[in-house]
Image: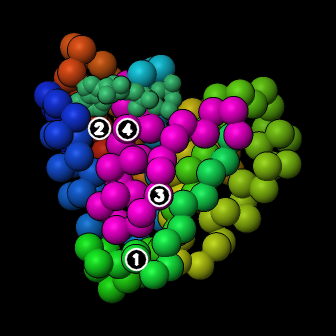
Amino acid sequence: MEAIVSSTKATKQLAKKIAEKLKPGDVLALYGDLGSGKTTFTRFLVEALGIKARVQSPTFIIARVYEDDNGAGKENFLRAITKVNHLDLYRLQSKPEVLDLGLLEYFKQPKSITLIEWPELAEDLLPEKTIEIKFEVLAENERKVNVQNLH
Ligand SMILES: Nc1ncnc2c1ncn2[C@@H]1O[C@H](COP(=O)(O)OP(=O)(O)OP(=O)(O)O)[C@@H](O)[C@H]1O
Ligand SMILES: [Mg+2]
């Protein structure tokens, strides 16, 4: 699926549409240049899942976890996903570093999904069914978003 989003509002709508199709255990690999909208998309996705948390770029921390057991699920079908792991591998240099981070542990956590910005280093480690989303800057407020493997 490919979409052109001409505003952050359109990105928000797209994130909601995608959020409705997610299942616990899903992994989303977010590709795209600096400023292409990976973190912005993550913020809208977390919101669409009904998880109240402040989503920030995890660049310096590498991993952030957003969890809202009580509030989650109002707009989250079946209340199935109550936790979002948000990783950003931009600062990492090698695959061992990715493993040290405990990447594979995130995938096993119950009721959670995992989003990974700059996932290139982790490619061999990602589940086969990983949902791939590619962001491309077309203009200041316009992005091309390509989504693969979302069923
Ligand atoms: N249609 C759009 N969709 C998403 N973001 C947009 C859009 N139009 C403008 N923007 C802006 O583009 C910027 C995207 O920044 P964001 O931090 O999400 O990028 P990123 O891909 O996570 O970058 P990085 O690789 O540095 O982590 C934000 O300032 C956002 O407001
Ligand atoms: Mg980012």
Q: Earlier in the sequence, mark 4 or mark 1?
A: 4
Amino acid type indicated by mark 2? Asn
Q: Is mark 3 within 8 Å of ligand 2?
A: no
Residue at 39%, 47% (x, y): give it: 43
Residue under pointer 3: 53
Give the quarter of the image for residue 135. Answer: top left
| Of 69 and 87, the residue lying toward us | 69
Amino acid type indicated by mark 3? Ala
Q: Position of residue 17 (x, y in %)?
A: 21, 58
Q: Is mark 4 within 8 Å of ligand 1?
A: yes
Q: Earlier in the sequence, mark 2 or mark 1?
A: 1
Foreground mark, 4 or 1?
Answer: 1
Foreground mark, 4 or 2?
Answer: 4
Label 1 secondary element: loop
Residue under pointer 1: 71
Q: CA distance from mark 2 to mark 1?
A: 30 Å
Q: What is the magenta range?
A: 36-61
Label 2 secondary element: strand
| Crowd band around label 1 with a 10 angstrom C-alpha radius: few (<14), some (14–19), many (20+) | some
Residue at 63%, 33% (x, y): give it: 59
Q: Earlier in the sequence, mark 3 or mark 4?
A: 4
Q: Is residue 52 magenta?
A: yes
Residue at 29%, 38% (x, y): give it: 146
Q: CA distance from mark 3 to mark 1?
A: 10 Å
Residue under pointer 4: 40
Residue under pointer 2: 146
Vertical side of 45 occupied by 12: above or below: above
Q: Earlier in the sequence, mark 4 or mark 2?
A: 4
Amino acid type indicated by mark 1? Gly
Vertical side of 15 occupied by 49: above or below: below
Query: Which residue is most to the top?
Result: 139
Mark 3 and mark 4 in contact? Answer it, CB < 8 Å. no
